[in-house]
């Protein structure tokens, strides 16, 4: 701490012994020890208070950062919600337009819907009767493999 070596301490001890005397030296060392102990306690107390103040400062800074993250997250959620609401309202308006146009085009679409290839799954060609009175069956994959 003060860069004092053993030789310097020995010189200080010899000087103290000569100045104070051997009779009063133990009392002087006890007094010096008490003062050194008090100084150490004060230094440790100061260090503890300083460390506590630093922790409080760090905690306050963390609280501010968390609050900033919270407001940022809330704003992004609000903007996502508004975007979703606008998408939903635009989809509803498109559905309403289709529903309004649907009765007009529903009568025209009914004959076209019967010509859809829904019968192909049942073994009948999509072209229906094909000019004959009976539907033409579709060959299954097993019949094609076996050559039937």
Image: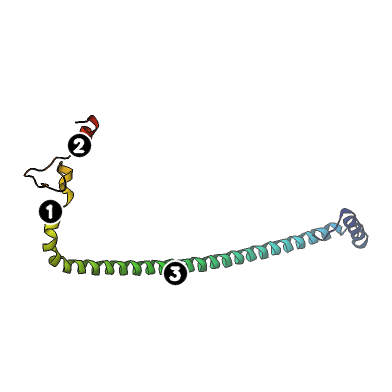
Which element carries disc 2, helix, strand or loop? Answer: loop
Q: Residues within 10 Å of mark 1 (few under 14, many from 20)?
A: few
| Real-space Cα separation, disc 2 to disc 3, in angstroms | 63 Å
| Real-space Cα separation, disc 1 to disc 2, in angstroms | 23 Å
| Real-space Cα separation, disc 1 to disc 3, in angstroms | 57 Å
Identity of the residue drawn at 17% across and 45% down: 120
The residue tagged 1 is 114
The N terminus, quarter of image = bottom right
Q: Is residue 106 left or right of residue 72?
A: left
Identity of the residue drawn at 63% across and 63% down: 51
Q: Which mark is residue 60?
A: none
Disc 2 and disc 3 in contact, CB within 8 angstroms: no
Number of marks drawn: 3
The residue tagged 2 is 140
The residue tagged 3 is 71
User: Residue lying farthest front?
Assistant: 131
Camera-side residue of 89 and 47:
89
Residue 70 percent across, percent down from the top left: 45, 66
């Amino acid at each position: 701490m003060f860069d004092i070596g053993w030789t310097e301490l020995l010189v200080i001890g010899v000087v103290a012994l000569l100045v104070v005397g051997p009779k009063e030296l133990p009392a002087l060392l006890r007094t010096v020890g008490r003062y050194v102990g008090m100084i150490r306690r004060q230094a440790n107390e100061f260090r503890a208070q300083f460390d506590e103040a630093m922790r409080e400062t760090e905690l306050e800074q963390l609280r501010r950062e968390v609050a900033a993250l919270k407001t940022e997250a809330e704003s992004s959620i609000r903007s996502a919600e508004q975007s979703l609401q606008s998408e939903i309202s635009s989809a509803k308006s498109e559905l309403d337009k289709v529903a309004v146009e649907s009765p007009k085009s529903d009568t025209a679409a009914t004959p076209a819907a019967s010509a859809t290839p829904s019968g192909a799954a049942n073994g009948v060609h999509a072209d229906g009767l094909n000019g004959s009175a009976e539907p033409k069956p579709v060959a299954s994959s097993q019949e094609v493999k076996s050559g039937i």
